[in-house]
Image: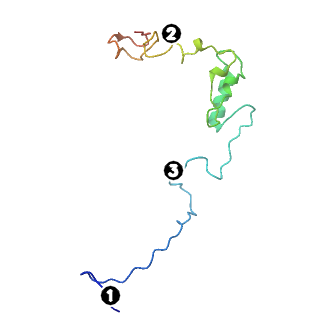
Amino acid sequence: DSKTTTGEKAQDTAPAVKETNPPKNTDNQNGGGIQIGDGDNQQKYSCGSPNHHCHNEDAHAWILNLELEGCSYCGSHSCPSFYAVNEWGDARYTPSKCPKYDTKKDAVEYCQACGKKIGNGDNDTCQKWIIDFTCPTCGELVKANKCHTH
């Protein structure tokens, strides 16, 4: 056997690498990683209540509490606003689904103290801070929880 070298010690050739699939984990007791989604062997949660879109027991309890309290707009204990769903099909309280919903009575949309649309204080909108704060736009010192407009 004659081998050609380039000034380095000649070496035997290594065997070719054989491609294989990763070993299957048969002992999956601790999980040990990130799981995205529900997994293949889990069943979808069902509370059994009509109109509910509960994804777990906590969501079911939350909807039951909404039903017990009743809707703040119409007073119903079975208001459609309790049974809306988000983009993933999970329960989502959506006040605008109530037949008696009024945007001006929604504290997320309008200030309940001054009646102005919630905003940053510009264009006749209302802005509040939870502490005394100097407005970064106009420099005025605004007391905590006081309406502020520019």
Q: In which quarter of the image is residue 15?
A: bottom left
Q: In this view, does 139 lie to the left or right of 113?
A: left
Q: Where is residue 101 in the image (x, y as percent from the top left)?
A: 65, 16
Q: What residue type is labelled 3?
A: Ile
Residue at which label 2 appears? 116
Residue ID at (50%, 7%)? 114
Q: Quadrant of residue 74?
A: top right
Q: Nearer the viewer, residue 96 or 23?
A: 96
Residue ID at (56%, 62%)? 27
Residue ID at (32%, 12%)? 139
Q: What residue type is labelled 2?
A: Lys
Q: Which amino acid does label 1 sit on?
A: Lys
Q: Is residue 111 left or right of residue 50?
A: left
Q: Is residue 48 left or right of residue 66?
A: right
Question: What kind of element bears circle 2?
Answer: loop
Q: Which residue lies furthest to the top in this view?
A: 114
Gap between marks 3 and 2 measured at Cα: 45 Å
**Quadrant, the N terminus:** bottom left
Residue ID at (62%, 32%)? 86
Question: What kind of element bears circle 1?
Answer: loop
Question: What kind of element bears circle 3?
Answer: loop
Picture colour scheme: rainbow
The disc placed on residue 34 is 3
Estimate how packed mark 2 is, as few (under 14), some (14 to 19) or many (20 or more) residues with alpha carbons within 10 Å.
some
Gap between marks 1 and 2 measured at Cα: 89 Å
Q: In which quarter of the image is residue 149?
A: top left
Q: Position of residue 30 (x, y in %)?
A: 53, 55
Residue at which label 1 appears? 3
Name the mark nearer the viewer: 3 or 2. Answer: 2
Q: Quick check: 123 above or below 93?
A: above
Q: Which residue lies furthest to the left in this view?
A: 7
Earlier-in-chain disc, 3 versus 2: 3
